Every structure is written in C-alpha cells, then in structure tokens.
Image (cartoon, rainbow, N blue to C red):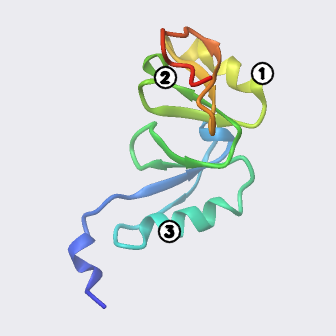
Amino acid sequence: MGCACKDKNGARFEVVTNGGTGRVAFTSGAGATARTTAETVMGRYPGSVLRKRGTQEIVHHGERYEVALQEGAGVVVFASSDLDQAKGQLTKHQGAVVRERESGIVQAGTVPAGLNKA
C-alpha cells in the first residue's frame, strides 16, 4: 500500500447541515481518505451535504432535489428532500434551477431548451 503523504495538500471537504445552508459540522483533513471519511460523517447528520472546503460547491448529498447554478449547467449549491424548501433557494441564486437529483428533470426555475431529460 502506497504512502498517503503525496495527498497532504489534496482536497478537503466539509459536512454542512441543512442542505448546505447550516453550520459546518465536520471538516476533513487532506489525504487519500478525506472524502470517504467526510461521507461517513455526513451519514450521521440527516439533511447534510458534502462540499469542497472553502466553496459553495456540493459534491455529494442524499436528498431528492438540488439547486444548480447557471440554469442547471453549474455547480450544485443546495439540496433538500422538500421541493418547496429547494424552490425557496431560487431567490438567492439568480439563474439557478431546482432539479431532481436522479433524473435531472427541472422542477422550477428557468428551463433552457434540451435541459429536461424526459
């Protein structure tokens, strides 16, 4: 097994409560297992998300809906199982859409041509 020291300056992750708008509950160290550890911790906080440290970009969540910037082509900045709660985030993010995580079908916001998979 190789040394993890090559990743000492690698990506760090944060577990953030309330779909990405709450407090930071955990910050990972850097290294080969940083994301795996953060995902494990995320499972202990229902409704939490995993994002890259120092950014608003959500890289992992287990919610049904997500708010994506740039009419769905940008990064995910919020996640929730409640559609109304996700729609409430649209006023904070100009040009964002609410879409279903698994299907990608847009539920609210601006729908550019060809974005819906249906």
Question: Which quarter of the rendering shows the N terminus?
Answer: bottom left
Mark 1 crowdedness (10 Å alpha carbons): few <14, some 14-19, many ≥20: few
Q: Earlier in the sequence, mark 2 or mark 3?
A: 3
Give percent across and percent down for residue 81: 76, 37
Answer with the quarter of the image where residue 43 lies.
bottom right
Question: Which residue was labeled with disc 1?
Answer: 84
Q: Residue furthest bottom?
A: 1
How far apart, in angstroms, are the residues tagged by discs 2 and 3?
26 Å
- Image coordinates of residue 93 in percent, x first then y, are 52, 17
Q: Residue at x 49, y 11 (%)?
A: 94
Name the residue at 69% across, 42% down: 63
Q: Quadrant of the C terminus?
A: top right
How much space separates mark 1 and mark 3, taking CA atoms? 31 Å
Query: Which quarter of the figure has residue 31?
Result: bottom left
Counting the numbered discs, the total is 3
Q: Are marks 1 and 3 in contact (CB under 8 Å)?
A: no
Q: CA distance from mark 2 to mark 1?
A: 18 Å
Q: Between 14 and 90, which is closer to the camera in this rendering?
A: 90
Please, what secondary structure does the residue beneath circle 3 have?
Answer: helix
- Type of the residue with mark 3: Thr
Which amino acid lies under the numbered mark 2 shown in the image of this protein?
Gly
Q: In the depicted view, which residue is nearer to us: 64 or 26?
A: 64
Direction from residue 37 to residue 41 in the image, left or right: right
Q: Amino acid at mark 1?
A: Asp
What residue is rendered at 49% in x and 22% in y?
72
- Label 2 packing within 10 angstroms: few (<14), some (14-19), many (20+): many
The image position of residue 69, as x and y in percent, is: 47, 22
Query: Please, what secondary structure does the residue beneath circle 1 have?
Result: helix
Q: Label 3, on which residue?
A: 36
When the figure is inspected, residue 63 is found, relative to residue 89, above or below; the finding is below
